[in-house]
Image: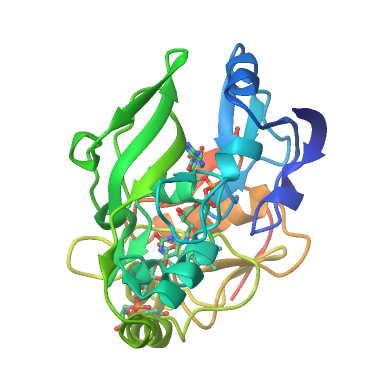
Amino acid sequence: MKIARLPLAKLTTIGVGGEAEVWTVETLRDLKTATQAPYRVLGNGSNLLVSDAGVPERVIRLSGEFAEWRPDLSGWVGAGVLVPSLLQAAARLGLSGLEGLHGVPAQVGGAVKMNAGTRFGEMADALELVELYHDGGLHVYRPSELGFRYRHSELPEGSIVTRVKLRLTPSTEEAVRAKIALVDAARKGQPKKKSAGCAFKNPPGDSAGRLIDANGLKGTTIGRAMISLEHGNFLVNLGGATAAEMYALIRKVQAVLPLEVEWEIWGEIAPAEVEVHQ
Ligand code: FAD
Ligand code: EPU
């Protein structure tokens, strides 16, 4: 186990966030030790906006036995494994079920917690069993017990996803790659700049990005944080943005549209009081 104070800006895709004590756990014993005090679990940091002051809790990262998997995708897959690696393996093996997650830079645990996906499929569809650590021990659940909905799960309080068993359907490499290409085409309009994916959930029957666009909010810039010109639901870090600036952008959108934030916000963030450019 490694324990170090690290800037979370380095461990999140949006590149924002202050320091925290990061506990990298490799065994169940490590996990038991790390969870003796208040904690948060970090996956690949691709859906997080972390306060500039960091967080006071321990930040647990899964490594070692929690990042193991077999290249044939049989058996248990560690929650610390990257979804894009699994998807590549699944394509080579001609196994279908994960294609809807193409382009989602998550770890398995973060994808389960957020039920990540696209309209082509979501994480819950590809799960046979989920192993969770909570209340001092490991527990195995069927996905039907975990309250999966659009970008939502209901895991027992304090749960850490440790491993999953995937439910994939035998297909062909060509068919799997063809479906990936469809998802890829649907993602073409998304920006490459640093972000945490879509900032807001889609309201039923509509798209938050479309609404933000239709309300003329694209291009709004606060400090180094900007509503992407390519896709209205991507709030991007132009380089050196603060959490306060990113959060001020969220408030700016919410002043106009009643959208629910999809990002997980860690720590207290007061929106920056800086000039808005449009
Ligand atoms: P993190 O961001 O690290 O954490 C997110 C939440 O999960 C936190 O609450 C964290 O505590 C919890 N968590 C992480 N690991 C565990 C664990 N092992 N056990 C329990 N809880 C855990 N999302 C989509 O749904 N669809 C998309 O198409 C999509 N596209 C994206 C594109 C880009 C470029 C980016 C940057 C993000 C995108 N996202 C998308 C958002 C993001 O990838 C997902 O929300 C993903 O599920 C987050 O996973 P993560 O491992 O990065 O989790
Ligand atoms: N649109 C606009 N202007 C914009 C953005 C979108 O008019 O600036 C329009 C598009 O033209 C399209 C509609 O809105 O007609 C929907 O846009 P898109 O196909 O890009 O889908 P989305 O609903 O904005 C969703 C997910 C994405 C996922 C894509 C995959 C949510 C909040 N977003 O986006 O997920 O990658 O579908 O197609 O569910 C994420 O959750 O982080 C994420 C990136």
The residue lying toward the viewer, choosing from 91 and 193, is 91
The residue lying toward the viewer, choosing from 238 and 23, is 23
Q: Quadrant of ligand 2?
A: bottom left
Residue 204 image offset from top left, x and y in percent: 19, 61
Would you place residue 112 above or below residue 40 in this image? below
Picture quadrant of residue 22: top right
Total marks placed: 0
Which residue does the image show at 23% across and 49% down from the upper left? 149
Picture quadrant of residue 278: bottom right
Picture quadrant of residue 239: bottom right
Which residue does the image show at 60% across and 22% down from the upper left? 31
Would you place residue 275 above or below residue 7 in this image? below
The residue lying toward the viewer, choosing from 106 and 208, is 106
Would you place residue 220 above or below residue 44 in this image? below
Which residue does the image show at 17% across and 68% down from the upper left? 205
Which residue does the image show at 64% across and 59% down from the upper left? 13
Q: Would residue 23 be found to the left or right of residue 71 on screen?
A: right
Residue 208 image offset from top left, x and y in percent: 34, 67
The quadrant of the picture occupied by the N terminus is top right
Q: Would residue 140 be found to the left or right of residue 192 on screen?
A: left
Q: How is the image coloured?
A: rainbow
Residue 96 image offset from top left, x and y in percent: 30, 70
The residue lying toward the viewer, choosing from 272 and 85, is 85
Residue 254 visible from this viewpoint: yes
Residue 272 visible from this viewpoint: no
Residue 104 image offset from top left, x and y in percent: 48, 65
Q: Would residue 74 be found to the left or right of residue 266 on screen?
A: left
